[in-house]
Image: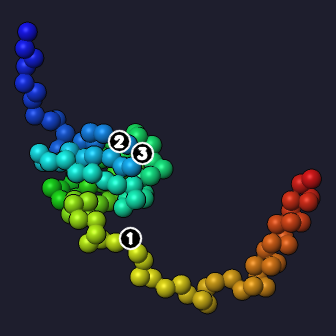
Amino acid sequence: MKSAALGQSTSPVEVTNVSRHGFWLFIAERELFVAFRDFPWFSDASIQAITHVELPSPHHLYWPELDVDLAVESIEHPDKYPLVSQARSNKALQPTSRARSARAKSKKRSRAARG
């Protein structure tokens, strides 16, 4: 007995496999690998959250449970989209050493009071 040919996918995007290194997405007749090292937002996510993916447009993916938006191109070419922030810290907003010391002392007192 021969099995019938598989029909078309009912979902425009589907997670086909998950490993400890990342997961595979099937989008528009092609399969793409999403490496956790390139997309760290997924590394601690549940399988349920990873597999709940939407394709709002042909070039845009969205994971509602994780609030992650990705362009398909960023998966195809992660080297073009490095995860390096260009932002610089604002020293005026950083706590001074005196403030850090006072906070540490306050935590010690709080722990000692709890027993």
| Residue at position x 40%, y 75% in the image | 84
> Amino acid type of disc 2?
Val
Residue furthest top as drawn: 1
Query: Residue 45 at what x, y percent from top left?
Result: 45, 48
Query: Residue 73 at what x, y percent from top left?
Result: 21, 63
Give the Cα separation between the discs numbered 1 and 2: 22 Å
| Residue at position x 21%, y 60% in the image | 76
| Residue at position x 8%, y 9% in the image | 1
Mark 1 lies on a secondary structure that is loop
At label 2, counting other C-alpha atoms closer than 10 Å, the crowd grade (few under 14, some 14-19, many 20 or more) is some
Of the pair 11 and 28, the residue shown nearer to us? 28
Nearer the N terminus, badge 1 or badge 2? 2
Query: Residue 78 at what x, y percent from top left?
Result: 28, 65
Residue that numbered label 3 is attached to: 20
Of badges 3 and 2, the one in the foreground is 3
> Amino acid type of disc 1?
Leu
User: 8 left or right of 99?
Assistant: left
The colour style of the image is rainbow
- How many marks do you count on the picture? 3
At label 1, counting other C-alpha atoms closer than 10 Å, the crowd grade (few under 14, some 14-19, many 20 or more) is few
Give the Cα separation between the discs numbered 3 and 1: 20 Å
| Residue at position x 79%, y 85% in the image | 98
Give the Cα separation between the discs numbered 3 and 2: 7 Å
Mark 2 lies on a secondary structure that is strand
Image disc number at residue 18: 2
Residue that numbered label 1 is attached to: 83
Q: Is residue 94 visible?
A: yes
User: 44 left or right of 81?
Assistant: right
Of badges 3 and 1, the one in the foreground is 3
